[in-house]
Amino acid sequence: MNDIGIRLKPILAKDNLNTLPTFSIETIEQYDADILFICDDDRKSESFFLENPLISSLKVAQDKRLYVVDGNLWRAYGPSVIDKIVDDLSKYLLKAIQNL
């Protein structure tokens, strides 16, 4: 992540970064993210997650920098998958910059 300029919060440093970090909705505010990607396997919409007061109260949600991505894709491996994830990242990071 550092190679592409993404700095993870210190709380994530203790996690195994060979996989996507997982956490409970009750502890999500501890991560204090500038941008939050929610990997969802069920293709729920962003509005589904924003209906939860614990999520909608987060600064990242209020600043419109919370994005729901395809969890099946983001946990997969292979060159074509990496291309799709990079496409997602560029799309959402550009959108996040516009919301600063």
Image (tube, rainbow, N blue to C red):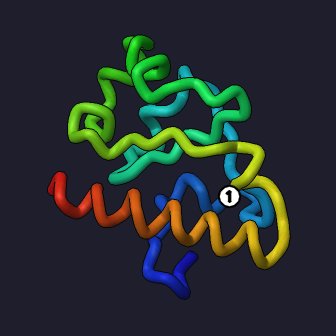
What is the three-letter code of the residue carrying label 1?
Answer: Lys
Q: Quadrant of residue 32?
A: top left
Q: Residue at image x 38%, y 12%? A: 53
Q: Residue extending furthest right?
A: 77
Q: Residue at image x 44%, y 81%? A: 5
Q: Residue at image x 18%, y 52%? A: 99
Front residue of this view, candidates 37 and 45: 45
Q: From what the image shows, is residue 95 above or below residue 90?
A: above
CA neighbours of label 1 inside 10 A, class few (<14), some (14 to 19), many (20+): few
Q: From what the image shows, is residue 70 above or below residue 55?
A: below
**Residue at label 1?**
14
Picture mark count: 1
Indicate the quadrant containing the N terminus: top left, top right, bottom left or bottom right: bottom right
Where's residue 92, x and y in %?
39, 57
Q: Residue at image x 77%, y 45%? A: 72
Where's residue 12, x and y in %?
59, 56
Q: From what the image shows, is residue 73 above or below residue 30?
A: below
